[in-house]
């Protein structure tokens, strides 16, 4: 059965991913940013213990980093669109809305969820992408998909793209040993 989940292993180099992590750590330490649970206006992230920045916010001033990540993910999305031509024909855009996130041991968001919620800013999300920035040991911190009975293991530089709708309920599994870093975002219907 088709899962509509695509994974590009080791798409970006470890050096590039280490640079992205370094930039995240730089910004997160300088700005007094809050955990996502504290900043969630819908109150549905009570158990979330992630730390994140949205690169598209003006205070970060990282256009080169935004372009680096966008170009890599856009390359994978182009391949995705070649395979699933319906997506290609919808003229999707990524809006450069990039969230870089660190999940500390025993943190994360372990609730089954999807990325397309009617009546919220997410209703026009069509695809989700994740760029894993570091390796995690086998059996921890995977992205698990409910209906596809599939897990994606975080390995440095790997990109995963999948539909944003309820058909792709997913969750992050527990981080145990060391922080997990990802960059993530969405493709929207224009």
Image (spheres, helix red, strand yellow):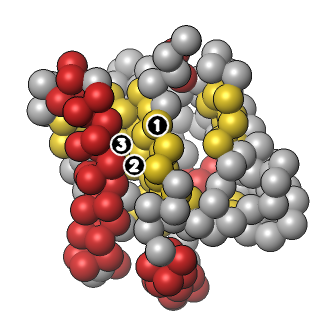
State the image coordinates of residue 23 (x, y, percent, origin top left): 46, 83
Q: Most extreme residue toward the top, as rendered? A: 1
Of pointers 1 and 2, the one earlier in the residue sequence: 1
Locate the N terminus and report the quarter of the image it occupies. top right
Left or right for 79, reference 185:
left
Callout 3 crowding tier (Cα within 10 Å): few <14, some 14–19, many ≥20: many
Tell me what residue is drawn at x 59 percent, y 24 percent. 169
Residue on which disc 2 sits: 185
- For residue 32, above or below residue 109: below
- For residue 152, above or below residue 97: above
- Tell me the distance, in whole angstroms, between the alpha carbons under discs 3 and 1: 14 Å
**Numbered disc 3: secondary structure:** strand
Left or right for 59, reference 46:
left
State the image coordinates of residue 17 (x, y, percent, origin top left): 50, 75
Residue on which disc 1 sits: 6
**Numbered disc 2: secondary structure:** strand
- Tell me the distance, in whole angstroms, between the alpha carbons under discs 3 and 2: 4 Å
- For residue 178, above or below residue 114: below
Tell me what residue is drawn at x 36 percent, y 21 percent. 119
Residue on which disc 3 sits: 186
Q: Mark 3 touching mark 2, by CB under 8 A?
A: yes
Tell me what residue is drawn at x 74 percent, y 38 percent. 110
- Residue 31 in view: no
Q: Which mark is residue 153?
A: none
Comparing 141 with 119, the one in front is 141
């Amino acid at each position: 059965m088709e899962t509509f989940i695509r994974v590009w292993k080791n798409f970006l180099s470890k050096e590039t991913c280490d640079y992205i992590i370094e930039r995240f750590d730089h910004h997160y330490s300088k700005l007094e940013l809050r955990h996502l649970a504290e900043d969630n206006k819908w109150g549905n992230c009570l158990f979330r213990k992630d730390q994140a920045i949205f690169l598209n916010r003006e205070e970060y001033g990282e256009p080169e980093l935004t372009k680096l990540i966008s170009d890599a993910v856009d390359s994978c999305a182009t391949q995705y669109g070649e395979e699933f031509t319906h997506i290609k024909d919808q003229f999707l855009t990524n809006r450069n809305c990039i969230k870089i996130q660190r999940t500390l041991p025993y943190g994360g968001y372990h609730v089954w969820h999807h990325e397309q919620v009617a009546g919220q800013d997410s209703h026009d999300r069509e695809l989700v992408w994740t760029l894993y920035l570091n390796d995690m040991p086998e059996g921890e911190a995977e992205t698990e998909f409910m209906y596809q009975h599939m897990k994606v293991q975080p390995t440095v530089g790997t990109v995963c793209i999948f539909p944003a709708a309820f058909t792709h309920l997913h969750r992050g599994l527990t981080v145990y040993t060391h922080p997990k870093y990802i960059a993530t975002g969405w493709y929207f219907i224009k």
